[in-house]
């Protein structure tokens, strides 16, 4: 009996120590701030060989930390109203409120009354500004040229938080390079494509079949999350004596993430959950990202092929300039892009990051991967490392003239650290092998064919076919499953429009 008591006390002590060292800011999935996670990496497989010099750099970065969107701010206002009702109901039933945290009584959203949302906040500006400085200092050979928009093109999606991130990054990259003000800033260009046609940085906006897939898949994802939310809802009802619903718990978790990342508050909404409950909630977010943006279905990342092609093309142009001995300042040295999690996550999948060798082979054979395992099992797929705020992939092209195997190599840095490319078995890959093993298998999938939504009238009516895809047309000829659904009368013409789409098998 005494031995059992000692064992129980030791278990409680161990758990308390573990909980005491727990930092919720490391477990916010894609709402995690960059400074919290940028230095949490596994050891690099290889270092850059001697005699190799960088000749070109590609950057694909997510925007920095932002405020909640207008839609989410309205949901937080609704949460405040419902929490007020829960406390009022408890008071009317003469229930004790001793277990209810004091901050919860009379709580109002910190964003109450704001008319706009989703903008880059000060912390996000600093994340991007400092990233620009670090990249310049790390690769001085690439950024020694006089700035010109053809030498250092900076591109952003048309969403303001992405373009603002590009500006903050550019200010850091080019600080003390000009003559404007005491900081010696200089003007620079940031270019954007229209949202309606940006297939490089917002391909998800232009891919009709992806939109159909996502809309169909979201209810299934919600079903997968329900058992976790129900379990935690039951625990919170028991712990605090308020009749929380599943939706309340989902919104309290959202509030926790916003408080921790935007306001640096971790002892209010986040304090409602135990560390294990936070781990479970984080897993549900990571699961959703995996299924709807990541390896869960090949359309998630294959629609990013235009971006991959753009990256490879820039490398080939840099090699040509090197081989033909173009004059300094006459060719591109870096291509710098700023977009969203919906850009960075698929691009990471195209590169085969966060996979082991067997998983990479499955992707090449177009076979689905297992879902990320539930805690307490470990997993590689974490939103906090795959795509935190300001998360990035940097592809550096090296010239290695003394190497007998290849004159040019590609190194991938994820969040500024070398990361293994499963297709190469290294983070430092011969350029031709990079193209053959990682890039080429994806290029057989044409973006237009993969993404085009076909509109057809039934046979008994005049045939009307169209294509909704940023002005692009095409058809998909690969292995696929075809589905369709009716949209209804087309602009009062009497034609019944049917959307036919094709999706490769997967989650």
Image (cartoon, rainbow, N blue to C red):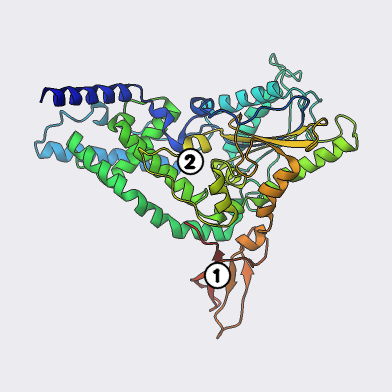
Q: Residues within 10 Å of mark 2 (few under 14, many from 20)?
A: many
Q: Quadrant of the N terminus?
A: top left
Side (left or right) of 406 relative to 196: right
Q: Which mark is residue 381?
A: 2
Q: Quadrant of residue 186?
A: top right
The mark that comes first in sequence, 2 or 1, is: 2
* Residue 357 x %, y %: 56, 45
Image-quadrant location for residue 102: top left
In the displayed structure image, the side of residue 35 where residue 475 appears, left or right: right
Does any portion of residue 355 appear in the rendered image?
yes
- Residue 352, position as x, y percentages in the image: 59, 44
Task: Write the residue at 32% across / 50% down.
Answer: 226
Residue that mark 1 sits on: 500
Which one is nearer the viewer's eye here, 164 or 260? 260
* Mark 1 secondary-structure assignment: strand
> Residue 171, percent across and down?
67, 25
Instruction: Give the x, y percent position of residue 67.
Output: 47, 34
Identify the image quadrant of residue 91. Answer: top left
């Amino acid at each position: 009996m005494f031995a059992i008591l000692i064992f129980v006390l030791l278990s409680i002590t161990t758990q308390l120590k573990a909980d005491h060292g727990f930092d919720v800011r490391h477990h916010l999935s894609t709402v995690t701030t960059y400074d919290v996670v940028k230095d949490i990496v596994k050891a690099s497989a290889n270092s850059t060989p001697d005699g190799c010099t960088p000749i070109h750099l590609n950057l694909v970065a997510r925007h920095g930390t932002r405020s909640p969107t207008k839609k989410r701010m309205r949901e937080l206002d609704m949460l405040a109203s419902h929490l007020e009702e829960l406390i009022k109901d408890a008071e009317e039933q003469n229930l004790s409120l001793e277990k209810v945290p004091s901050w919860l009584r009379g709580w109002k959203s910190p964003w109450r009354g704001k008319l706009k949302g989703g903008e880059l906040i000060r912390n996000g500006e600093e994340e991007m500004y400092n990233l620009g400085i670090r990249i310049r200092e790390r690769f001085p050979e690439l950024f020694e040229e006089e700035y010109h928009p053809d030498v250092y093109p900076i591109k952003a999606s048309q969403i303001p938080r992405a373009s603002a991130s590009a500006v903050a990054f550019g200010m850091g990259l080019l600080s003390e390079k000009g003559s404007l003000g005491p900081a010696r800033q200089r003007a620079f260009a940031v270019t954007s494509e229209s949202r309606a046609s940006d297939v490089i940085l917002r391909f998800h906006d232009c891919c009709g079949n992806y939109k159909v897939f996502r809309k169909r898949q979201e209810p299934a994802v919600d079903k997968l999350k329900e058992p976790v939310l129900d379990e935690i809802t039951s625990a919170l009802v028991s712990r605090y004596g308020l009749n929380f619903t599943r939706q309340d718990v989902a919104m309290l978790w959202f509030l926790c993430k916003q408080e921790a990342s935007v306001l640096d508050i971790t002892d209010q909404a986040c304090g409602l959950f135990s560390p294990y409950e936070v781990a479970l909630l984080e897993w549900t977010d990571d699961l959703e990202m995996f299924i709807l943006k990541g390896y869960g279905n090949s359309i998630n990342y294959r629609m990013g092929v235009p971006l991959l092609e753009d990256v490879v093309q820039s490398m080939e142009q840099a090699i040509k300039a090197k081989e033909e001995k173009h004059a300094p300042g006459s060719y591109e040295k870096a291509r710098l892009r700023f977009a969203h999690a919906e850009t960075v996550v698929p691009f990471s999948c195209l590169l085969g990051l966060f996979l082991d060798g067997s998983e990479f082979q499955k992707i090449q054979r177009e076979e689905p991967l297992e879902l990320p395992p539930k805690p307490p099992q470990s997993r590689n797929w974490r939103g906090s490392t795959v795509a935190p705020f300001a998360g990035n992939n940097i592809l550096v092209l090296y010239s290695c003239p003394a190497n007998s195997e290849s004159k040019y190599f590609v190194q991938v840095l994820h969040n500024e650290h070398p990361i293994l490319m499963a297709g190469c078995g290294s983070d430092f890959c011969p350029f031709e092998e990079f193209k053959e093993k990682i890039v080429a298998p994806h290029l057989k999938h044409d973006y237009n064919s993969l993404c085009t939504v076909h509109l057809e009238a039934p046979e008994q009516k005049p045939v009307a076919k169209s294509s909704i895809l940023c002005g692009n047309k095409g058809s998909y000829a690969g292995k696929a499953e075809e589905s369709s659904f009716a949209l209804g009368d087309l602009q009062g013409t009497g034609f019944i429009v049917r959307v036919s789409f094709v999706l490769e098998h997967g989650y």
